[in-house]
Amino acid sequence: MIKWVDSNPETITRKCGIIIDHLLNTTVKSIEGRGKGMVIVRSIQDSVKFFMEMNKQLKDKGLHNKIKCVVGFSGEQQVNGEKVTEHSLNKENGFDSKDIPTGFKNPLYRVLIVCNKFQTGFDEPLLHSMFIDKPVNGVQCVQTLSRLNRKTRGKKSTFVLDFVNKVETIQESFQNFYQTTILSEDTDPNLVYDILDKIRNYNLFTPQEIEDWNNIFFTENRDDSLLQPTLNVVLDRWKELSDEDRDLSRTQFSNYCKLYGYISMVHQFDNIELEKHYIFFEYLRKKFPVDGNERIDVSDLVDLDSLNLDIKGKLNISLEQEDTIFDPNEYGEGKGKDEEEFDLLSEIISEINDYYGKVPEGTEDGTKKLLKDIVNDKEFQSVVESDNTDSNKRDKLQNIISDKNIKTLDTNHKLYDYFEKEDVKEKMIRMFISRPDLLNQLRG
């Protein structure tokens, strides 16, 4: 739901306005008037949306000839029914260079918008500000924010505006790399080979496929879309495995990446094949589906009228003078993902409200009270637990919900109108019938 709101055009419009304000007041005034900014977003689609919206707002402000944007992504995207690339979009904005790092040095271009590309390896000393609209943590967080850590004449400060991440997440990510990372005990590098052997036993890929994929990966100015066919073939083979083997193999892929990633920092492997598998597995892991998470349409469940973009705080994050101890021998043998714990509805509401601003007063408490009244009703419980068809259950549950909802008229008319909507009642009924585990939580 949060991802849907973040990618909504209205949200992007507001965020672009905030970014442009900071660009004008902070970024372009920094480094003796030469400062530049980078915007990190969730997806390629969002990078295109931010690029077009920022150009629009700059033009509306009469600044499009003084501050210009550059967008960076791999492959092609559909925009208004037409295929576009980073080069075609940038060219329309007067940026004719196919080499973004070199062309971005032009004083006219002050903002680079990306999702994954240039989060690592991008070296631009004039980069002063970073605007983050994407969850980052661990090594990725350190690598991303470290794009600002380049010295140049007149650079006395850096600035980060984060729409998404918590201070604790950023602090913890950097803390692990601040002092010295100490291995808690000696590690046997052969463990990496043992895990790789287990993965190979599933026969999901061939040595030639790994080799060909890496040749594409290490090609200069590669097209990331060319990496996908081999990954998709391997994923299709993985889907043919039994449920148990899918879980175990997914765990082994994760174990390999974690273990190799750490051991390779302190042990020199002579086998380049380990590195090739590591890179391939890191990309493959991102394509594994999460069991039980069905894609749903939340567009009619979110009221953007209640969206607030408030400043949570402006601060410096300090790190502790302590070493980090890492036990490289600890890796799981269980399922490939942690078992999800379903939050109480109240916790979900609280989390979303904390992120976007409070909904109208009384809506939270009224929602919780209404749901508790429904699930604690004796007739409701007998209907849900009966052997009737779902169709018969729906008819009775609709009447029960309507009867209970009438009580909300006394306290919140807006809430009553919302729960009287047929689509809302249908979603509630579907949840009650398919998720009996939620009922016990709501009865508490």
Image (cartoon, rainbow, N blue to C red):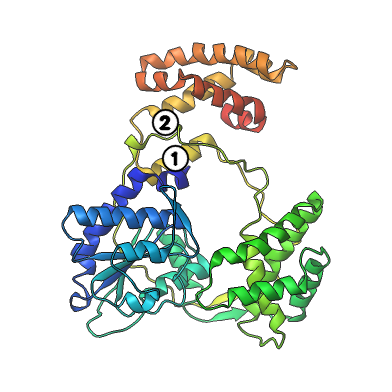
Residue 429 x, y percent position in the rendering: 59, 23
Q: What amino acid type is highlighted by mark number 1?
A: Ser
Compared to residue 202, the image places residue 443 above or below, namely above
The residue identified by callout 2 is: 364
Report crowding for label 1: few under 14, some 14 to 19, many 20 or more residues within 10 A (C-alpha). Answer: some
In what quadrant of the picture does the C terminus appear?
top right
Q: What amino acid type is highlighted by mark number 2?
A: Glu
The residue identified by callout 1 is: 350
Residue for point 55% across, 11% down: 399
Is label 2 in a helix, a strand or a loop? Answer: helix
Is residue 258 visible in this depiction of the protein?
Answer: no
Nearer to us in this view, 434 or 42: 42
- Tag 1 near tag 2, CB within 8 Å: yes
Compared to residue 431, the image places residue 323 above or below, namely below
Is label 1 in a helix, a strand or a loop? Answer: helix
Nearer to us in this view, 252 or 366: 252
Is residue 438 visible in this depiction of the protein?
Answer: yes
